[in-house]
Amino acid sequence: LTTRERAIGRAIRRARVASDAAAAAPAVARRTWKQSRARVVSQREYGAGFRWLELELPAGFVAPVAGQFVQLLLDFPSPVLLPRPMSVASTRRVRSKLRVGFLYAAVGAGTRALAELPPGASVSVTGPLGRGYPLHEPGSPVLVAGGRGVAPLLMAADELARSRRQCEFVFGARTAGLLIGVAEARARLARGGSRLHVATDDGSRGFRGDVVGLLAKLAPKLERPVVIHACGPHGMLAAVARWAMANDARAHLAMESVMACGTGVCRGCPLPRSSEARARVQAEGAAAAALKGNPEWAMCCTDGPVFEARELDWERVS
Amino acid sequence: MKSEPRVDLAVRVGSLTLRNPILTASGTFGYGDEYAHVVDLSAIGGVVTKTVTVKPRAGNAPQRVAETAAGMLNSIGLENVGLERFRDEKLPRLRALEATVIASIGGETPEELETLLRALGREPGVGAFEVNFSCPNVAAGGARYWADPTRLERTLAQLKPLTDKPLIAKLSPDVTDIRDTARACERGGADALTAVNTFVGMAIDLERMHGKLGKATGGLSGPAIKPLALARCWEAAAAVKIPVLGSGGIASGRDALEFIAAGATAVQVGTATFLEPEACTRVLGELRAWLAANGIARVTDLIGAFRAEPAQEASAARNGEGA
């Protein structure tokens, strides 16, 4: 080692110690995200215009949990500038490396370019980011998915199965053709002893109506408290949140937002806090965790993306 | 093994010596600690913190960000924790991280800026203050309010006695002639300038016939503005004797070097951090490598190297002054 390299090593160690000391301060979550290069393992059509992407990340990348997301950045030259927040649909270890799956639709310039990437191509991934579903919360877990919102919930079902817990899985879409990967979902759920319940608006499959209608039918048969974990369009999530609040259930909803940084610094992804949450944040005052003290707005990226129903003002969620 | 030639990267901004010329831009690096696990804050030139105001601000309604060609618009609205929490929670953490801290302060009136400097002016751990005279996204005390050279000069003269630390005036590019605001700040006693903040821009969603931001306009940043920002930085640097910090679309060592050649003493990396959290570290490495490869022993030797080009200077003077 040269003197310079030793000096750099000392500087890094000093910074780590300082960083650890700073992170040890109360009420500040230890940050584990980082940016890594990732390799495209495979991409395949998943039906209804959706694609399944699998990326391989280095062993040191912390595995995301259900409900968390990563920022996916295409290499130069890319048609878009900013990274795209992508909800994680699966994780597995293959020879110590981490394989992460995503379900996405190629609808914009960025996702269309992503769809073009062949196996072996590389991208940058920052994560894991945000707060996932609190699956450990006691009660009867009911997973509620709308359309492509199914991805993180299948992952949640797998996580529950690993801790030997079963769940009710409510999967809704406008019509049968949009129940993305429903056969795979049924098989995966059955392996863990969980049950799939399907709802379509047009009645082309399963219950005719929306997921809230099906939820209302299902809930009385379950042991209380009912704990919902949901993902889907914001309109659906608002309906689930209102049902949960009216029926003394808990509901954890995975929200979406346009984002820039994804790490909490740009303050670009606000969601309106409920009056209840606003009062609590104000009362916590200086004791609130770093950057969480905004009584008006929660940040989707760091306060979420998963929020309990009572945290947000659903009248103002767009 | 042949060792890399040593390059002296230290630069001076008023009484403050920066270990190197790479800083983070305000509003893109939080209060520093958010990135401390991936960026060695003690190795970069300094951290310019999110603009702090006297009272906490909740910020603007969504949407706050929108991507545009090679850039992004933002309308955050100076969301920040306010003076008290900044001083009591954020500053101690930055001190622990051994960062050179440039605290960005913002106010709707000269009096608010005075309040901030009275509270923070002698706070240990703050190396300098950057006064945000150029936020494009607030109803009061934004770029338009501070575009008046007389107001800038008078305000800086009021602020100057309140601190021994350097005062850096961050300028808006959206003025008729940035040399007027730059000179006014110098006359008022600014120790340095930052050129420039974001450009006012907008984008419309035609189907909804609604702005892509919650407010009609926002601030444009990213690679799209680099040539524009470089020109403003060059003009400002040529107009004053105080140091200028270049800012606007810097994403590589070469970008940073262009600003330095145009007269910047140091530069700020902003939007690039949103793509790559460690962007400032990479920019620093690239800058050091380029200087070493080109046999430049001190980064200060390059400051204004382009400005000194006689033919270009003469023609620019003709274009600038003649019309």
Image (cartoon, coloured by chain):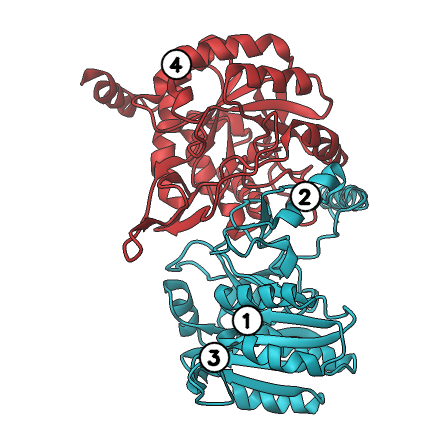
Quadrant of the rendering where the C terminus of chain B is positioned: top left
Residue B78 placement, left or right of B312: right
- Mark 2 and mark 4: Cα distance apart in space: 42 Å
Name the amino acid type tagged 1: Arg
Whether labels 1 and 3 belong to a single chain: the reply is yes
Give the vertical position of A118 relative to A191 (above or below): above
To which residue does mark 1 refer?
A39
- For label 4, the SS is helix
Residue at 64% over, 43% down: B3
- For label 2, the SS is helix
Q: Earlier in the sequence, mark 1 or mark 3?
A: 1
- Mark 1 and mark 3: Cα distance apart in space: 32 Å
Q: Nearer the viewer, mark 4 or mark 3?
A: 3
Question: Residue A279, which numbered label?
Answer: 2
In percent of width and height, residue A303 lies at 64, 53
Q: Quadrant of residue B47?
A: top right
Residue B322 placement, left or right of B198: left
Marks 1/4 in contact by CB < 8 Å: the verdict is: no
Question: Residue A173, which numbered label?
Answer: 3
Within-10-Å neighbours for mark 1: few <14, some 14–19, many 20+: many
